[in-house]
Image (tube, rainbow, N blue to C red):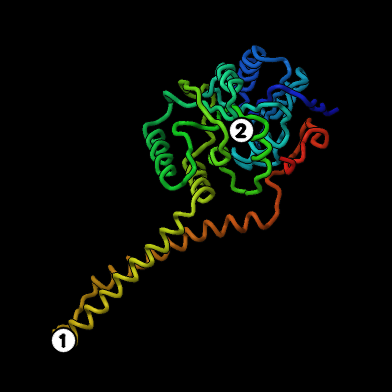
Amino acid sequence: MPAFMKHNKDISVIIPVYNEHDNIEELYRRLLESVKKITNKIEFIFVNDGSTDNTTLELIKLAAQDDNVFYINFSRNFGHQIAVSAGLESCTGDCVVIIDGDLQDPPELIPALYKKYKQGFDVVYAKRNQREGETVLKIATSKLFYRILKRLTKVDIPLDTGDYRLLDKKVVKILNAMPEQNKFLRGQISWVGLKQTFVLFDRASRKNGKSGYSYGKMFKLAVDAVTSLSDKPLVLVSRMGFVVSFISFIVILYTLFSHFILKVTITGWSSLIISSMFIGGIQLFSVGIIGEYISRINNNTMGRPLYVIDNTNIDNSKTVEDSSKL
């Protein structure tokens, strides 16, 4: 018989998981120890993003032992940002903590996040001071991306932060009212504004298993970030088109002048191929950028649900508030 989530929780903790069978028991224990220092009115919402190991069985067992544990099992892998969004739509706490299930983000930091929250902040980030167990390439590309993103957008996205953070319930309501399919929650939360701050911590290396975030998924997240927060790539396309057209016009004038005035005809297979490949490359690059924006428009107009739930012990009809009532 499914458990029913109760209202008026002080803290909700959302944990997206993917093949984290070996980490769930320790994660739950550490979360419980940390959050119990603040309040007993809590709920843990595990969102299982189509795991292929025994994660589902582990969550069902955990929920049978603790009435404060809830799970949402997706029908397939929909992605990390969608999993977090599902948790945000089902939580009932006055504040919400988002934390990954790989034990790299320490649950012991939650009391410090909550302390900042009680000082009047609406969003409290966990900002990484050091990052253990990650390759130099991954750290370098991550730092480079967020610094480029900061230049491309007017939204002030904190550097060296992930999804580990604490949100006030009014921020959650605003996020739930955002209809876009290609989610980039870090940017959306920054876009909201309100009072935001951070707490520094040292990020540990992954304890068990391997990361589900491949470079391909990280690249997709980067594209979602840029297209959801900035139109500067489209401005870049138009400017490149102007520059290339101007250069082409100058070359045409020079060719005509050389042929009719200087009586010298410009020939050469190499110059023709190089110019054709250059212009072709610019065209393909431009079409690709425009296509990314069109793809997102198409996704948002199809009206498909963000995710499909296989099974859950949450009675959503009793818990999900109307996110349009802000």
| Spot occupied by residue 134 in the image (x, y as percentages of width and height) | 42, 29
| Spot occupied by residue 160 in the image (x, y as percentages of width and height) | 45, 31
- Label 1, secondary structure: give it: loop
| Spot occupied by residue 295 in the image (x, y as percentages of width and height) | 57, 57
The N terminus sits in image quarter: top right
Type of the residue with mark 2: Tyr
| Spot occupied by residue 179 in the image (x, y as percentages of width and height) | 66, 48
The C terminus sits in image quarter: top right
The residue singled out by tag 1 in the image is 261
Residue 222 tag number: none
Asked which quadrant contains residue 143, the reply is top left
Q: How crowded is mark 1: few (under 14 residues within 10 Å), some or many (20 or more)?
A: few
Which residue is at the front of the view, 66 or 54?
66
Q: Which residue is drawn at 13% across and 84% down?
A: 262
* Residue 223 relative to residue 315: left or right: left
Disc 2 to disc 1: CB gap under 8 Å: no
* Residue 90 relative to residue 204: left or right: right
Asked which quadrant contains residue 94, the reply is top right
Residue 127 against residue 263 in the figure, above or below = above
Asked which quadrant contains residue 112, the reply is top right
Which residue is at the front of the view, 219 or 56?
219
Q: Which residue is drawn at 71% across and 48% down?
A: 305
Q: Which residue is drawn at 47% across and 45% down?
A: 154
Residue 18 tag number: 2
Instruction: Give the mark count.
Output: 2
> Which circle, 2 or 1, is nearer the viewer?
1
* Residue 142 relative to residue 266: left or right: right
- Label 2, secondary structure: give it: loop
